Image (cartoon, rainbow, N blue to C red):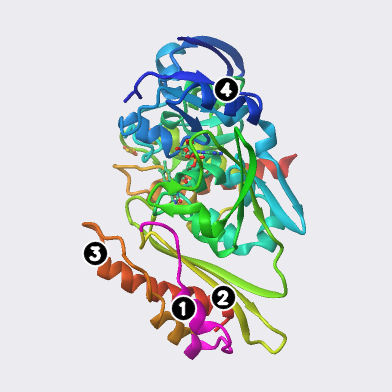
Amino acid sequence: MYPAAFDYHRPGSVQEAISLLQENPEAKILAGGHSLLPAMKLRLAEPGAIVDLGSISDLKQLSLNGGATIGAMCTYDALLNSNELETMFPVLHEALAWVGDVQVRNLGTIGGSAAHADPAADIPAALVALEAEFVVVGPNGERTIPASEFFIDIFTTALEPEEVLTQIKLSAPDGNVVSAYEKFPHPASGYPVCGVAVVVTRDGSGNVSSARITATGSVYVVTRLTGAEDALTGTGGDASAVEAASERATEGVSEFAGDHYASSEYREHLTKVFVKRALNRALGN
Amino acid sequence: MNHSVSMTVNGSKRDGNVEPRTLLVHHIRENLGLTGTHVGCDTSQCGACTIMMNGKAVKSCTVLAVQAEGADIMTIEGLAKDGELHPIQEGFWEEHGLQCGFCTPGMILSSLDLLQRNPNPTEAEIRHGIEGNLCRCTGYQHIVKSIQYAANKMAGAAGDD
Ligand SMILES: Cc1cc2nc3c(=O)[nH]c(=O)nc-3n(C[C@H](O)[C@H](O)[C@H](O)COP(=O)(O)OP(=O)(O)OC[C@H]3O[C@@H](n4cnc5c(N)ncnc54)[C@H](O)[C@@H]3O)c2cc1C
Ligand code: FES
Ligand code: FES
């Protein structure tokens, strides 16, 4: 299968990429290509031009000083190879390790996963639970978008067509933070039917001072499960508190995804089960 | 508009001139004449098209030839050295790791990526490492044994140094 014909550009800098996007309104950015190229081969996408970010070395930098500044073009594999990143943000490491297979992880990028906003992507669950910030550069300069405003809907983010996602920033964990990512993979595609990321902070006496719990796969866009977050906050985080939080996990979620493989009722149920599993593992219950 | 591309393939510099939409697997098979790399699903699922790009296993049906500009590529044809099979190839021979052989080039190169990272994998780690490769014949059992054979052989060779 061949994609439809397109013009190919390989800019050496972000500025050059932005100019190319301005000159070619039909253009699409190419990162790891592991969502875009399959879509182009099926002619679900027929961009008139491709702007390949593969030669912009700045976008492949990972810097760790307290927190993490992750270049959008860092591959999953490159990030999995950083022990420091794993120690600081184990929930991100777990989500990265769950993506696809080794060949996909060797080329797919963290920025591509975020910008694509596939409702069944693993990485956004971890990024939203970690309250990541998204640095984007466009014709009007740079802006930083908080995770709560970045993912808008199915395949839709706050990125404008002429903007490039350049970096994802994570703040260092503050205090006693535990986390986990649990996933129910689709047996054929490997994408999450339901994935849940949890990041929980405990205070000096061991009580939960804050909880950030997200769902992917079971919903159309990565979603904070605020019912479960509220229920867990202030408790001792024991198994009964987790049980109570999981019961409230789907509160306020307007719609669960459903298809011929798994109905929305089933995905709603899975969300509760995976909130419980992820919290119990993170909290050591 | 065609683009010129230049890459190192199995140790030799190979230049070409391709349409941007040419997939790397087609460039390798049709322009460079290396047909050991197969096209199975053509939808990024089966791993039959797996090659090594800059030392890592990738699915060449999901890479544009122009993206491989300047890359170091190894296909299955580049694995045996001086007419001597690589230990992974020997493993597939000795342990009956193939039947029809269609998945084999990709399977072997994913195994190479695995053994580079983890020279002594458990059975579970082997099965995880070849998750991106589908085989419709063997049931995988003999593939796992072939990779175990290779790991043992390579550990022995490393010990001899
Ligand atoms: C066989 C297979 C299995 C997979 N399994 C999983 C899985 O289990 N879990 C999972 O989460 N994902 C899975 N994926 C998807 C994979 O993670 C993709 O790599 C990812 O969704 C997209 O990243 P990419 O770098 O490949 O982006 P591309 O495909 O290159 O781009 C995706 C989209 O994002 C845009 N874009 C990319 N980078 C930027 C940027 N820096 N700024 C602005 N826009 C940008 C592009 O224009 C395009 O629209 C799988 C893919 C395959 C082929
Ligand atoms: S042909 Fe490339 S993954 Fe199947
Ligand atoms: S040997 Fe036939 S597909 Fe694997």
Position in image of residue A242 (x %, y %): 48, 84
Task: Say which amino acid is labelled 1.
Answer: Ala
Within 10 angstroms of label 1, few (less than 14), some, or many (20 or more) residues? many
Q: Quadrant of the C terminus of chain A?
A: bottom right
Marks 3/2 in contact by CB < 8 Å: the verdict is no
Q: Secondary structure at mark 2?
A: strand
Q: Which residue is mark 2?
A: A211
Are the residues tagged 4 and 2 within 8 Å (C-beta)?
no
| Residue A10: mark in rendering | 4
Do residues under tags 2 and 1 come within 8 Å of each other at their CB atoms? yes
* Of the image marks 2 and 1, the number of the one nearer the N terminus: 2
User: Is residue A240 in the magenta section?
Assistant: yes
Chain of residue at mark 4: A
Measured Cα–Cα span from mark 4 to mark 2: 42 Å
Residue B153 on image: x %, y %? 59, 43
> In the image, are marks 1 and 4 on the same chain?
yes
**Mark found first going from the N terminus, 3 or 2:** 2
Q: Viewer-proximal residue, A232 or B11?
A: A232
Horizontal and vertical percent for residue B124?
48, 58
Type of amino acid under label 3:
Ser
N-term mark: 1 or 4: 4
At label 4, the amino acid type is: Arg
Position in image of residue B66 (x %, y %): 51, 20
Say which label, 3 or 4, has the lower sequence index. 4
Asked if residue B159 is among those painted magenta in the image, a careful observer would answer no
The quadrant of the picture occupied by the N terminus of chain A is top left
**Dot 4 alpha-carbon crowd within 10 angstroms: few under 14, some 14 to 19, many 20 or more:** some
The residue beneath circle 3 is: A263
Give the extent of the magenta segment: A220-241
Both marks 3 and 4 on one chain: yes
> The numbered mark 3 sits on a residue in which chain?
A
